[in-house]
Amino acid sequence: MTESNLSNASDLLIEIGCEDLPAASVEVLANHLAQGLYDALKKAELCNSAPQVFATPRRIAALWPSVGERQPDQQVERKGPAVKAAYVDGEPSKALAGFLKSANATVDDISTIDTPKGEWVVVKQTQKGRSLEEVVAAAMPDIIKTMPMPKRMRWSDFDHEFLRPVVWLCAMHGNTTLPLTLLGLQSTNETQGHRFHSPAPVALAQASDYNDVLRKHYVIADFAERRAFIKAEVEKKAQALGGTAVSDAALLDEVTALVEWPVIVAGQFEQNYLEIPKEALIQTMQENQRYFALLDSNDSLMPGFITVSNIASSAEQTIVDGNERVIRPRFADTMFFWEQDKQKKLADHQQSLGSLMFQEKLGSVGDKVERMQQVGGWLASELNISEADVKLAASLCKCDLNTEIVKELAKMQGIAGRYYALRDGHSEAVAAAMEEHYFPKNAGGQLPVDGVAQVVSIADKTDTLVGIYGLGMKPTGAKDPFGLRRSALGLVRIIIEKQRDINLAELIAASVKSYGARLPAEFDQQTLLDYIIERLKGYAQEQGFSIDAIDAVLAKSLDNPLDIIERLKAIDQFRSTDAAESLAAAAKRSGNILKKADGVQLNAIDATLLVEPAEIELYKALQTLEPQIEADLSQRDYQKAMTATASLRGSVDAFFDNVMVNTDDESTRNNRLALLNQLNALCSCTADLSRLQPKEA
């Protein structure tokens, strides 16, 4: 905003009131309104400050501070025809006349400007600034049109569309109503308070009063403020009950979007329901009733819950009774499923896995489990983990898909299996694999803890990747129905973070073998390996490794994630030394020379052909270091190998300063190329150093 329109600046309020919005849309719509109109006001030079956003089930609103009343007038320059085309025999041409008419100007208003293409006619005019009313009226239809709504609806006999019927429209600039017609309503200075505590319209004296006035009428309009209040009050109530509330961001957001005047109340349920796995009860409370479950100091579920009412009732016990009455039948259903599942052991569900389809061409879930046992058994022997436990866990890990409790509560998949495996007397390691083989469930999520669970998880993810990728069903930017990205990244994370020494090419080959004839013979396993390595590349960047270091390591065509990370760590340490840049340059220089000599047969270095002191010194240094570096590489002590390589700096610099490689004598030239080849191999033993960028880059 310029000084010319700051003097008339006042707060601007826009509020759209409607029937109760879906919880997931409340904050989203409010933010869209706020950002869309802020962009329009800023472009019009009427506002510089972001608004305060308000969002409740019945309203979306925003309050912008210091919004100008009118745009400043602007000097604009309209370009007309070229001077040589503007006049004919000294009189205005048709082109000039048409331009003057469109610009509402006369010949007296004309001036000229010089351009690289010659002299042109221009008209300089003052463009009157639009009023705030005009700017808002022009912007709002498009803002409404682009609001993210899953489905729009019409009401009454109107043509207007919105997520829910719009009931009122409040628009104020300072202490005056901003005239605005939108969605069939004319704006006023009136808002509405709480539906029950303050049902009558509420007049605002000025826009800045909005938040405080609504609070007096039982509405906490600021979403963030209301959320923080609910969080604090729920925690306080839980503490008073001797427990801790089970909460997450999604539950808090949803509850916040359902109420305008939050009142925290607590209820109870019968102790016998605690026989059900606590995760099932928590899921039922959260997803069906938006309740906060309670845990005691031992992390055990308490027979109670906290809920957030949207009304301060004088008969609070009635609200409590109603919530307790609603939750009982849901728990009773869950108890029934739990009791039904008790009648079978987990292993009894194995046979029915054949009726669950994994993928039409890849077979059933039962077929998948058999492949997981085969790959998991091989992997367990490679990693010195109990093969028997891995095969048993793999055979049972999908069985809970056929249990009643998982059919009713899908998120109990794996969790129910863990409970049932323990109930059936299986070991902790096998039982944990029932749940943890699905880990990680999201980006940065928890990984399997025990080795058995890790191997089953790797076998499961690899089977999915190989099968779906093998059929050519590669994920696209928009579609990844089988979660291949998540599987690939989970696979990488387990191998690296759990320090599992696994060769990806061998793992893929083992999985392909387990599929037998189900996969096309032309399936190129390298394409899947490249896909997984790409996920590893992104993971390495998130861990702080530089792109050039990652490229330098991956240039070695490696397929062991643990090995790749160790090499990256070594490069990080190496490039902090003074020798790093010099040796990287030497690797690049030697590599370029060798590329130009491509096709030349390089034999073993002939020491008798070494005549220059610098090449003799380099040869001796290489012969001394090579066995040491090979020993370091065999132990994967890449930091030690890189440090040893750094000791070549002086010899390498002297060689390039004093020795001519491409001499006329062919035998001498080829011998020096062989020496450079040995140097290049040692310099690139951990990574292709020529790909490292200078520190400045």
Image (tube, rainbow, N blue to C red):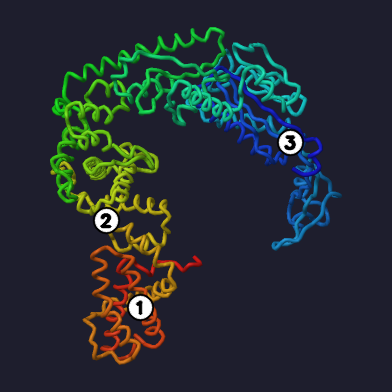
Instruction: Name the disc covering residue 560, or none.
Output: 2
Residue holding disc 3: 66
Between marks 1 and 3, how big is the CA–CA gap?
67 Å
Instruction: Name the disc covering residue 239, or none.
Output: none
Estimate the x, y position of residue 420 in percent, counting from the top left.
21, 26
Badge 2 local density, few (<14 within 10 Å), some, or many (20+)? some
The reply to whether residue 82 is in sight is yes
Between marks 2 and 3, how big is the CA–CA gap?
59 Å
Does 24 appear above or below 121? above
Does 368 appear above or below 488? above
* Element carrying mark 1: loop
Q: Quadrant of the N terminus?
A: top right
Estimate the x, y position of residue 223 in percent, counting from the top left.
57, 28
Name the residue nearer the viewer: 685 or 452: 452
Disc 2 or disc 1, which is closer to the eye? 1
Of mark 2 and mark 3, the one earlier in the sequence is: 3
